[in-house]
Image (cartoon, helix red, strand yellow):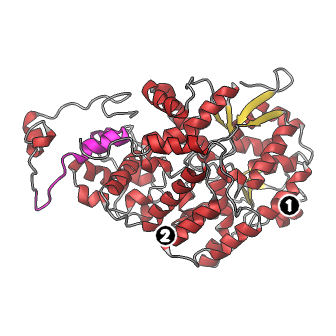
Amino acid sequence: MLRRAGEGGHQTSPALPQGKETVLKTKDDSESRSPVSIGGVTPDSRLRDLVERLSGQKVADCYQCGECTAGCPVAFAMDLMPNQVTRLVQLGLAEEVLACRTIWLCAGCQTCVARCPQLVEPSAIMDALRQIAAERGIKAPEGEIEAFHKAFLNSVERSGRVHEMGMIAELKLKTRKFVKDVPVGLGLFTKGKLSPLPKPVKDRAAVKKIFKELRKHEETADE
Amino acid sequence: MSSAPDNAGPMKYAYYPGCSLHSTAKEYDASTRAVSEALGVELLEIPDWNCCGASSAHGEGHLLSTGLPGRNILLAEQMGLDIAVPCAACYNRLAVANAEMRSDPGLAEKVSGVVGLQFQGTSDVRPLVDIIVNDVGLEAIGARVRRPLEGLKVACYYGCLLVRPPRVLGFDDADEPMTMDNLVTALGGEPVTWPHKTECCGASFSLTRVDVVQKMTGDVLRMARDCGANCVVCACPLCMTNLDMRQGGIESLTGEKIGLPIFYFTELLALAMGLDMVKSCWKMHFVSPEPLLRETAAV
């Protein structure tokens, strides 16, 4: 794992005063933390650690200035604003944040990354949350986007390169939206931009090995 | 590596076309090869390259999203060359993976072990537009112009992945990049001043949330038009797909006419340099550039 929280360029954030820290933590050992219920909501005190480990981001460094949200070009379509996603992770509100549309609607355009004054990378937090949501079997509210990512990676795993026509066929089978985009699909085909047959890499085993050994290598479960 | 062909050896790069340039962006590949050859830039395709994982692999974990581009970097290191990448998305994935492997020996070791080649960190990853403009140089390019692009008012669209994140990429300014603007000027065209140079087009949502792409791409296109552009130039197959292929849908959604042809920067180069091959590119576009080119006599 590359950028564990607290390593690399980031400084470990100063410890909170003891009294405050014990509001949510009963003991340092995560195994023996007892859940604390606040207003009927039980925070998942390990969510932040997990996101930090997967994303390499110091989630606690976010001081909620909202710069990420102000610059986000997809904010108009999101249910939670990007700074709210980070805030929910800080608070350990796993149920809310893992079920939101925002983590699937992040386009990965890196505008937030370029603008964050605290050098937090919100898009990396979104990536980590998608992984955790998938791992925990939480249904993605943006099913088509999830299906696209799966179809894309299946295509790469099969042949080492993306075969657009095969990927689109798989996406349509999964989403059952057969008539969507037929005109542009036909346009791509008649312009010779979609090949009926894949052109795989020669060393398919090499790419399969990358998937086998490097996919899900990072534990998303609680340790 | 740098400088003009007359005072250095031949400019030679490991070429990573990426999946799009073999399918939806064939005209980008063809014009890239033609222009590079004409300018003395030798592109040697990385043998048996694989997909970089683009916008999907990083949702499956950091290791996979480094390993997929990593194999291509290791293959290029065997060639002893820097890597030229025309697609902005591929460039981003390869450059980020390269930077992370350079700074994290443990990660480099893991990828090296799986690929079976030792990472050395000797190949730089560079966008093709950077190589053309900064290695060949605008002066050498200007000397090759046969048909100046007079009458073309060009909105230079860089999109996201060519310039962000600036802490890793940084071949040009992340908010006000000028590489393509300077190129357009050298080719005799007129770059327009506009604020959406690095806005996002919606990229990979092109096949799923078309409504989201129509809003994002529509905003970019309308801004280009309102700032006086009569065409847009880009350096990314995903940008091209959204700006070109989705333009008709955006027009019928709002009932307005946008009518902006979209070019790859390599097509504008081929056009200005009088390379005949470029005519075969136009039929690959959804918004035909031919009426504009006839009108401006740039044909």
In the displayed structure image, the side of residue A2 where residue B94 appears, left or right: right
In the displayed structure image, the side of residue A24 where residue B283 appears, left or right: right
Q: Residues within 10 Å of mark 1 (few under 14, many from 20)?
A: some
**Quarter occupied by the N terminus of chain B:** top right
What amino acid does circle 1 point to? Leu
Q: Residue at point 90% right, 48% down?
A: B275
Q: Residue at point 77% right, 25% down?
A: B3
Question: Residue B222 in the image: x percent, y percent?
Answer: 63, 65
What residue would you read off at disc 1? B293
Q: The residue marked by circle 2 belongs to what chain?
A: A
What amino acid does circle 2 point to? Lys
**SS type, badge 1:** helix
Residue A41 is a magenta residue: yes
Q: Nearer the viewer, mark 1 or mark 2?
A: 2
In the displayed structure image, the side of residue B217 where residue A61 appears, left or right: left
Q: Nearer the viewer, residue A78 or B117?
A: B117
Vertical arrangement, residue A210 with respect to residue B284, above or below: above
In the displayed structure image, the side of residue B78 where residue B200 appears, left or right: left
Q: Nearer the viewer, residue B120 or B257?
A: B120
Question: Residue B10 in the image: x percent, y percent?
Answer: 82, 26
Q: The residue marked by circle 1 belongs to what chain?
A: B
Q: Residues within 10 Å of mark 2 (few under 14, many from 20)?
A: some
Q: Which residues are magenta?
A: A38-63
**Quarter occupied by the C terminus of chain B:** bottom right
What residue would you read off at disc 2? A174
